[in-house]
Structure formats: C-alpha cells, structure tokens
C-alpha cells in the first residue's frame, strides 16, 4: 500500500505547492491591505501543508520530487485553464479551488493507513483564511449584486474543470484509482465509485455557493 500512499501524498503536495505560489501572486493584486493579508495568510497555510506532506513522503522512503512529478502537467493545466479575470474571480478561485481539492483528497484518504489519513485530514481541514475569503466574496456581491451571476458561472466552471482534472488523475494513475475503489482485489477502473464521489463533490460545492450567496 506504500506506493498508493506516496502517490496520494505526491499529488496533494504538488497541489499545495502550486496553490501557495498562485495565492502569493494573487496577494499582489489585492485592492487593499486587508485583502492582501487574507491571501497571504492562505498562501502561508498552503506552504506549511506542503512541508508536512513532503516530510511524510520522506518518512516513507520516497523523494518528494519523484512523488510529485507525475502530477505537474495535470495540476498546471488546470490552473492554465482557469486564469481569473479580476479580483473577485481570484477570490472565488481561492475559495472554491481550495475546498473542492480538500473534498477530493479526503475521499482518496479513506483507505490509507491511520497516520497518513490523519495527516491528510489535518491538511485539508486547516483552512486558515478561507472564512475571510468567503466574507470578502459576500461583501463584493452585496456591494455589486450584478457580480453574483458572473461569479456563480465562474464557480461552476472552476468545479467542472476540477472534477475533470480529478477524473484524469485517477484514470492515469492506477495507485490512486485503487485508493478510490478501496479494495486491492477490485478493478481499479470501478466507475461506480468515481460517479458517487463526483456526486458528493458536486453537492458540497452547491452548498458552498449558497454560503457565498452565489446559488440560484
């Protein structure tokens, strides 16, 4: 099972590393100091997660760069396809992107060893700064209600791209497919399990849109 755990930690570590660099860049576009601080706090949290994950990869006898390498192209492609246009879209991507990733990796961690599962749960639950981001989004929509429709469409696009990325990752990496299925004796391409996972991720996303004031 070690191979499967390293694969999970590798994709999660690269996701966190990429999130750190992109959120730090987003902070430079903030319209005011409070917004800049919120993005910087979120970025700092992602970098802390990255170090926790790479430390666990080393404990398991693997090299972090080798564990992350298979996922670079897929994660980078997701970000290339979802470049935000303006500050409100940056906020929504920071919030929605973080939460949908957390949901997905929590699903993959159900069947790993207890130490790794606890680490993944710590990483995906530690969302310091996200509440501030959510409040900034709500404030922006309250100040300009016309934003709601545009940002709702943007959020749906982000989730669509994120779910497509998740499917590609699982299809391309047998180790992650096995984790999703949860049984080494079952075929790794069990689409029923994937369909159920995607359904749960979509439902949680819809709930978040309501919290943000972006649901229809």
Image (tube, rainbow, N blue to C red):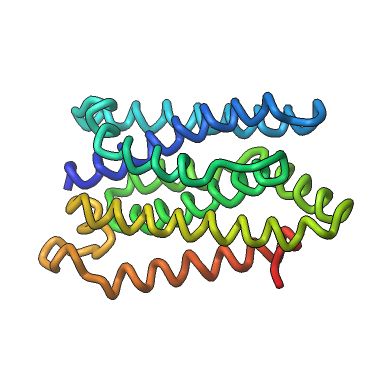
Residue drawn at (24%, 39%) of the image: 6
Q: Position of residue 202 (x, y in %)?
A: 50, 67
| Quadrant of the drawing holding the C terminus | bottom right
Q: Is residue 158 above or below residue 12?
A: below
Residue 177 sits in quarter = bottom left
Q: Is residue 44 above or below residue 191?
A: above
Residue drawn at (79%, 53%) of the image: 138
| 85 lies left or right of 65 | right
Q: Position of residue 69 (x, y in %)?
A: 26, 32
Q: Nearer the viewer, residue 121 or 75?
A: 75
Q: Nearer the viewer, residue 20 or 108?
A: 20
Q: Position of residue 178 (x, y in %)?
A: 20, 58
Total label count? Answer: 0
Q: Position of residue 118 (x, y in %)?
A: 40, 45
Point out the residue furthest to the right here: 143
Q: Nearer the viewer, residue 152 or 20?
A: 152
Residue drawn at (75%, 49%) of the image: 137
């Amino acid at each position: 099972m070690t191979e499967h755990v390293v694969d999970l930690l590798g994709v999660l570590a690269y996701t966190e590393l990429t999130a750190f660099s992109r959120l730090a860049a987003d902070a430079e576009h903030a319209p005011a100091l409070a917004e800049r601080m919120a993005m910087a706090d979120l970025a700092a949290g992602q970098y802390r997660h990255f170090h926790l994950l790479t430390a666990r990869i080393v404990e398991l006898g693997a090299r972090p760069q080798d564990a992350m390498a298979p996922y670079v192209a897929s994660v980078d492609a997701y970000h290339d396809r979802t470049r935000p246009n303006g500050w409100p879209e940056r906020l929504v991507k920071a919030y929605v992107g973080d939460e949908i990733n957390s949901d997905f990796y929590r699903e993959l961690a159900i069947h790993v060893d207890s130490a790794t599962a606890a680490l993944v749960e710590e990483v995906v639950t530690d969302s310091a700064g996200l509440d501030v981001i959510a409040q900034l989004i709500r404030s922006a929509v309250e100040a300009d209600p016309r934003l709601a429709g545009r940002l709702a469409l943007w959020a749906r696009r982000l989730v669509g791209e994120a779910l497509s990325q998740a499917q590609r990752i699982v299809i391309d990496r047998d180790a992650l497919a096995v984790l999703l299925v949860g049984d080494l004796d079952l075929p790794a391409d069990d689409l029923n399990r994937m369909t159920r996972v995607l359904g749960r991720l979509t439902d949680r996303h819809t709930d978040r849109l309501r919290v943000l004031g972006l649901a229809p």
